């Protein structure tokens, strides 16, 4: 097999990231939602861990559809505004504009 195949590069990147703390398993690709261009379970887990009060509100307001609503609104916001705007300003479901400040604070603590 040629070492110039894209899959070889992809495997090397994934192995490097995994060896530096990134949670990665080969079967993770099955969890990727192509329509949303997201890993929905990762998005939900992140919001639940980082913003438990916001997740509680989302779950209360949207019930069993909370995860789908969260991911759809995030995808719509990313498509409309782009990642930097969403990071800086949040998006309409969470209305959480402190996200950028939180990320900046984490970065300065490193």
Image (cartoon, helix red, strand yellow):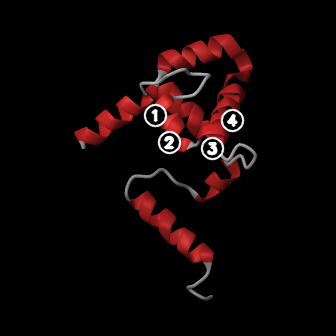
The reply to whether dot 3 and dot 2 touch (C-beta < 8 Å) is no
- State how far apart marks 3 and 1 are (Cα): 21 Å
For discs 3 and 4, the disc positioned in front in the rendered view:
4
Dot 1 corresponds to which residue?
Answer: 88
Foreground residue among 10 and 19: 10
Dot 4 corresponds to which residue?
Answer: 76
Q: Residues within 10 Å of mark 2 (few under 14, many from 20)?
A: few
The reply to whether dot 3 and dot 4 touch (C-beta < 8 Å) is no
Please name the residue shown 55% across and 20% down the image.
Answer: 55
Please name the residue shown 67% across and 47% down the image.
Answer: 37
For discs 3 and 2, the disc positioned in front in the rendered view:
2
Q: Residue 8's quadrant in the figure?
A: bottom right
Q: Residue 26's quadrant in the figure?
A: bottom right
- State how far apart marks 3 and 2 are (Cα): 19 Å
Marker disc for residue 39 = 3
- Look at the numbered disc 4 and give the secondary structure of its residue: helix
Q: Residue 62's quadrant in the figure?
A: top right
- State how far apart marks 1 and 4 are (Cα): 16 Å
- Look at the numbered disc 3 and give the secondary structure of its residue: loop
Q: Position of residue 109 (x, y in %)?
A: 24, 38
The reply to whether dot 1 and dot 2 touch (C-beta < 8 Å) is yes
Location of residue 99 with respect to 6 vertically, above or below: above
Foreground residue among 104 and 10: 104
Give the mark nearest the N terminus, 3 or 4.
Answer: 3
Give the mark nearest the N terminus, 3 or 2.
Answer: 3
Give the mark nearest the N terminus, 4 or 2.
Answer: 4
Q: Position of residue 99 (x, y in %)?
A: 43, 29
Dot 2 corresponds to which residue?
Answer: 84
């Amino acid at each position: 097999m040629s070492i110039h195949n894209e899959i070889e590069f992809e495997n090397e990147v994934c192995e490097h990231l995994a060896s530096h703390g990134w949670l990665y398993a080969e079967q993770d690709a099955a969890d990727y939602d192509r329509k949303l261009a997201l890993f929905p379970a990762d998005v939900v887990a992140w919001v639940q861990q980082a913003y438990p009060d916001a997740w509680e509100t989302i779950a209360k307001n949207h019930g069993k559809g909370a995860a789908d609503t969260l991911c759809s609104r995030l995808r719509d916001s990313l498509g409309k505004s782009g990642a930097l705007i969403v990071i800086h300003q949040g998006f309409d479901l969470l209305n959480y504009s402190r996200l950028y400040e939180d990320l900046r604070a984490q970065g300065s603590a490193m």
